Image (cartoon, coloured by chain):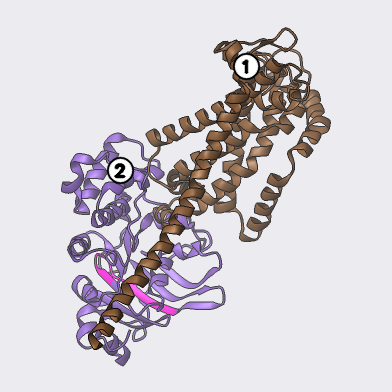
Amino acid sequence: MAKAAAKTELQAPPEKLVQRRWGDAVFERTSLLTALSVFALLALTGYELAHGSRLALHKFGWRFLAGSEWNPVSEQLGALPFIFGTLVSSAIALLIAVPLSIATAVYLTELAPQWLRQPLTLFIELLAAVPSVILGLWGIYVMVPWLREHLFPLLKTTFGFLPLFQGPIYGVSMLAGGIIIAIMIVPIITSVSREILRSVPGLQREAAYALGATRWEVTRIAVLGYAKKGLFGAVILGLGRALGETMAVTMVIGNTPQIKASLFAPGYTLASVIANEFTEATTDVYLSALFEIGLVLLGVTILVNVAAQLLLKTFGGPGVKPQN
Amino acid sequence: MNLTMTPQEDKPAPAPPVEPPAVPVRVEAPAAPQSRAAAEPPAGAPALTVRKLSVYFGATQALKSVSLDVAVHAVTAIIGPSGCGKSTFLRSLNRMHELVPEARMEGEIRLFGQDICSPGVEPVTVRRRIGMVFQKSNPFPTMSIAENVTVGLRLNGERRRSVLNDRTEQSLRMAALWDEVKDRLGAPAISLSGGQQQRLCIARALAVQPQVLLMDEPASALDPLATSKIESLILELKKEYTIVIVTHNMQQAARVSDYTAFFYLGELVEFGPTAKMFTSPAKKRTEDYVTGRFG
């Protein structure tokens, strides 16, 4: 009797352990499932786009990517002007936004007096919260006229020898699109860069200060050197936004499917053409072509991100990475 | 050399060897190593003269009217329990404490007679003459071993390859690291072990040929073997440099230093030759601390 009692007492604890591990397994499986749903979502999006565009895929094949004609009436549909427009407007946006954002982030973390840091950060985050259609309205009624009257003529007289700044000035243009995207991605690049720069250890700065470095030298050798990998990540995050930006760009880029060297000429982007034309897509092939535009946009975005990741792996040194 | 090394409470301060000019002049960093010897006064005069130094962080006073002399070509150890102000003292010697926004300082610090705290003197120039090594090694991770050594020189505008190469070898030899890294100077600095990284940081500080080297617990994050390497390095370096070292480790202070200062609650309790401090200290509190009765 006593023996049996002792036996059950000994056996009891392992059972409890087993139960606890089972709960842990449930937790693990559930989180695995939610993590996998990310893959499922992306795969499903890709599948739906491919399924929707099967008519166009079948009709145009690879010519869809190379064709520069966009004529829904004669069903001559090619995506090249849109790909061009998306890449060029995003490139302009990055050229403007990256120096601006990183300089702002450096000021915020390294130079600004304490009392200014919080309000400035708040305003940058508010800028990110401005709905893109409002920026677009401002773009049409304020920015574009100003560009047409002041900035573009100045660019034309100063840099008119470059093909980039030749030709008639309409106001709505590739450059206007690029500028509005730049305004939209500055807050994201700035706030991610700020986080990256804040994560540079104080000991790195002290090392430079102790060598007699000035504030600029400390920033250059200790902060930017350490953070460059992370800053590159911040830029890629901004690029992702730029490629997919729709509303504000549509309102100022001019929506003309053409490939022109001049930045004053109107353009069109992949995102804009979908937003503009899906309500008027009357034929099945036309609608299917818009789906394929969406597929191309998804492809371009993924390609750019993968290329950036590879670049980072190849050339990136040690240092902090973005935590996203 | 030990003639000036008596506690300042007992004896009036010796007159600074060089009369300071009425108008504060900007202290220039030595552009070339040759100028270093010329700037030094005859042996015996203190390298650093600290008078009535008080440091405040906001409302709290971290240092209370500290006066002491740091002897040339000797090791001065600063000991004391945590929070006693020894790191603050060390950092104020090359004005690193100013990196804390609300830091404030009273008193006087002279480097070979020149006032380094007056408003006309830029901290940048002070730090080029008074180098610093930190508790945790902090090489620049994106730079190679050689680049880490020469970064200070390059900040000073030195561009000549031959000079940079010479100084790299010279500094790494002085830091007792040359033989371990001479075949991979281009390798990233963070590929080195912890002890090697700390010696690299010492080489980096030496490369600009400072007049004084400050060390803030340079071996506290290292294993015993790496620690003993750093300690023998310190003994080697004092032939050419004036060293001030903060340490938590009393045996270390006893092993490497010529003079020891004991700080407690922001005050300098006692200062004197290390042998005396550890065998027959004048103050009861010093004795309690060095014998391990508190702290």
Q: Is residue A272 left or right of residue B148?
A: right
**A154 and B37: which is toward the camera:** A154
**A120 and A211: which is toward the camera:** A120
Amino acid carrying label 2: it is Pro
Mark 2 surroundings within 10 Å by alpha-carbon count, few (fewer than 14), some (14 through 19), many (20 or more)? many
Task: State the residue at coordinates (40%, 51%).
Answer: B29
Q: Quadrant of residue A182?
A: top right
The numbered disc on residue B109 is none
| Vertical arrangement, residue A211 with respect to residue A312, above or below | below
Chain for colour brown? A
Q: Residue furthest front?
A: A1
Q: Is residue A64 left or right of residue B21?
A: right
| Vertical arrangement, residue B4 with respect to residue A60, above or below | below
State which mark lies toward you, 2 or 1. Answer: 1
| Vertical arrangement, residue B130 with respect to residue A232, above or below | below
User: Residue B95: in sight, yes or no?
Assistant: no
- Position of residue B199 measured from the top left corner of the image (x, y, whole percent): 25, 55
| Vertical arrangement, residue B56 with respect to residue A250, above or below | below
User: Residue A135: in sight, yes or no?
Assistant: yes
Mark 1 surroundings within 10 Å by alpha-carbon count, few (fewer than 14), some (14 through 19), many (20 or more)? some
- Residue range (magenta): B65-76
For label 1, the SS is helix
Q: Is residue B9 magenta?
A: no
Q: Label 2 marks which chain's residue?
A: B
**B77 and A257: which is toward the camera:** A257
Q: Which residue is mark 1?
A: A55
Task: State the residue at coordinates (55%, 64%).
Answer: B101
- Position of residue B267 measured from the top left corner of the image (x, y, whole percent): 41, 82
Chain for colour purple? B
Q: Which residue is mark 2?
A: B188
